[in-house]
Amino acid sequence: MSRKDIDAVLNDGISAAVHFIEKSGEFFPFGVVKTIAGEIRHIQTLMPDALPTSDTVSEALETSLKEGADIGEYNTVAIVSNVEVTDKKMKQDSMP
């Protein structure tokens, strides 16, 4: 895994995440991989629950991506997740 591979996977993941947020305002976590053949792919999980938690999806993705890496299918992987960060002080200051 080279810095160039990492940059390619992360740039693709960020671009896709921005697209999903602009289109839907949110998204479930997804994986981005660079295969041994050099292809960038998006990986999603099929969950039995219609509305799984992001943590459940991330755990399933992690398992799947580890398996792909272990068998030599992927050389670079990332999980992209929609995370909201709030400033606790700012939130407290805005309370009446």
Image (tube, rainbow, N blue to C red):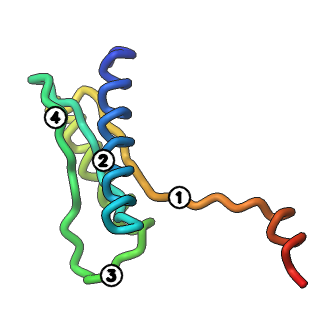
Residue lying furthest left: 37
Where is residue 57? Give x, y as percent.
34, 65
Q: Is residue 51 left or right of residue 87?
A: left
Q: Secondary structure at mark 1?
A: loop
The residues bearing labels 1 and 3 have C-alpha atoms spaced at a distance of 17 Å
Task: Identify the residue at image location x=38%, y=50%.
Answer: 18
Task: Name the residue that disc number 4 marks.
Answer: 71
Residue lying furthest front: 22
Of marks 2 and 4, which one's residue comes earlier in the chain? 2
Task: Name the residue that disc number 2 marks.
Answer: 16
The amino acid marked with disc number 3 is Leu
The answer to whether residue 65 shows anywhere in this view is yes
Mark 1 residue crowding within 10 angstroms, few (<14) / some (14–19) / many (20+): few
The residues bearing labels 4 and 3 have C-alpha atoms spaced at a distance of 30 Å
The front one of 53 and 90 is 90
Task: Name the residue that disc number 3 marks.
Answer: 51
Looking at the rendering, in which quadrant would you find the N terminus? top left
